[in-house]
Image (cartoon, rainbow, N blue to C red):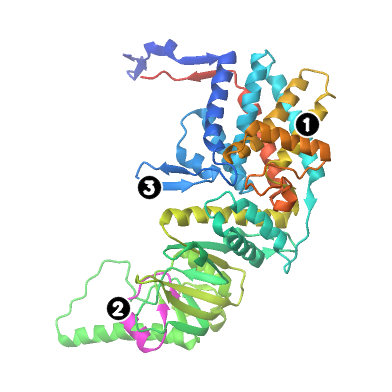
Amino acid sequence: MALAFDEYGRPFIILREQESKSRLRGLDAQKSNIAAGVAVSRILRTSLGPKGMDKMLQSPDGDITITNDGATILEQMEVDNQIGKLMVELSRSQDYEIGDGTTGVVVMAGGLLEQAEKLLERGIHPIRVAEGFEISSKIAVDHLQQIADKFDFSATNIEPLVQTCMTTLSSKIVNRCKRRLAEIAVKAVMAVADLERKDVNLDLIKVEGKVGGKLEDTELIYGILVDKDMSHPQMPKEINDAKIAILTCPFEPPKPKTKHKVDIDTVEKFQTLRKQEQKYFDDMVQQCKDVGATLVICQWGFDDEANHLLMHRNLPAVRWVGGVELELIAIATGGRIVPRFQELTPEKLGKAGLVREKAFGTTKDRMLYIEHCANSRAVTIFIRGGNKMMIEETKRSIHDALCVARNLIRNNSIVYGGGAAEISCSIAVEAAADKYPGVEQYAIRAFADALDSVPMALAENSGLQPIETLSAVKAQQIKENNHCCGIDCNDTGTNDMREQNVFETLIGKQQQILLATQVVKMILKIDDVISPSEY
């Protein structure tokens, strides 16, 4: 490295090592990229399905995450390789769009990359491989549409939704009480769903967790849960038919913006100042009482004197409630958030049938339940569990279940899980391969083989003989022309996924195939990797 100056005297650096930039070309570049992608997918392969393993990840500051969720594993893994990052983004986009199937999509992409490598070694041009994959992904997506079943559900009959959510939860750590959690998730979604528009706003479902108790104590609250307690220990712990004033102004004397000082040289002056302050608090509390409020929820703190006055005037209050929670309370109770005391009017108050404070166990932890609200469109799922990691993992599992229920409300088509849909697509793609005359035929057959990577991983994780099991199920599907045959992971003795009630959403499966194909096409098109030299 040398330092030189240009004609204006500005220094610039001349790098001698320009030629030592590492560069991979042609087949070598593709092979190294494929190896990186396959390495990432191998990590996730073992956590697919109901018998999948969990991963334990430690962040740089020592926090531990134990999870089975593909997107979370890849987010926390901090992959450095650029192609590895593509796989992380692939799983993230599946998570944002569908919310479920984040592991399967990476396993499928890994299967496609492995197959592509074999084709490249035979000397087939990567673009032809990519085109073959594109054709076959269209065939597979259309085939899924044909084998999909629709099922009808209504606000009263939610059983089909519960069955599908149970499939999602069965691969998670919470599968011992999946029935209960699936019911909670479906009821929560149905409570906030707009069935005419077929839309669900998941922001209205708040998921709270508290360490302690057991998983079975998890409950659904038709209302809001706030992790706060009453500001004074002697305030009533239960209020029926509460009228709630939601304030964003503090219960404190006003503080002028300018710098000032008050000279007090006599006792009288001090008395007047104190009286003035007292009157100020009196007016505040009186304004709240005048509009008929029976509970005050405030974003800021209270002065001790204000707290004492509120106690005396029988006006229960809660302080330091966060902004997001305030908004949810306002939505649920139909109240308005009031920025100044002068603007309080009776119609801006929120209404709730019951506000109660509940204590947990022997700890001094208390939480506030706001239930039977005027507008019950906001609900809370309250998770209990033995430790923090368990609660975090349950939150992620519930999120997946909520997303599945939402997708079913949007589009009520389902396909059968347990690898049945993939095997069926694989047979359809294999059959269609003969119609294409060019080199693409090889790529289409390879795509059919790659689709088998998901059922193969399922069989492997369940401790079955992978190749034997897969070929038996495939033969059964062809023989009986029954697209419900999948891998019997739970060893129940039947391969029919309809009997086992293993369903997946159609849009989730289609999205998996499309996203995996897009990423693999992108990786195959890279033929030159130039990376900076290491100093």
Query: Whole-Å distance between the Cαs marked 3 and 1?
Result: 45 Å
| For the residues bearing labels 2 and 1, Cβ distance under 8 angstroms | no
Marks 2 and 3, the one that precedes in the sequence: 3
Q: Which residue is mark 2?
A: 304
Relative vertical location of residue 404 with respect to residue 439 in this rendering, above or below = below
Q: What is the secondary structure assignment of the residue under circle 2?
A: helix
Q: Nearer the viewer, residue 224 or 214?
A: 214
Give the number of the disc on residue 360.
Answer: none
Residue 516 vertical position relative to residue 437 in the rendered view, above or below: below
Camera sees residue 517: no
Q: Pointer 2: residues within 10 angstroms few (<14), some, or many (20+)?
A: few
Q: Earlier in the sequence, mark 2 or mark 1?
A: 2
Circle 1 SS class: helix
> Residue 35 location in percent, x, y?
54, 24
- Identify the magenta region: 297-317
Q: Residues within 10 Å of mark 3 (few under 14, many from 20)?
A: few
* Number of other residues with Cα within 10 Å of mark 1, as a class: few under 14, some 14 to 19, many 20 or more: many
Mark 1 highlights which residue? Answer: 429
Lateral position of residue 410 relative to residue 247, left or right? right
Q: Nearer the viewer, residue 395 or 230?
A: 395
Q: Residue at x 49, y 47 (%)?
A: 67
| Residue 63 badge | 3
Label 2 – label 1 distance at C-alpha:
73 Å
Give the amino acid at mark 3. Answer: Asp
Give whichever of 219, 344 is nearer the camera. Answer: 219
Task: Give the quarter of the image for residue 479.
Answer: top right
Q: Position of residue 133 (x, y in %)?
A: 72, 27
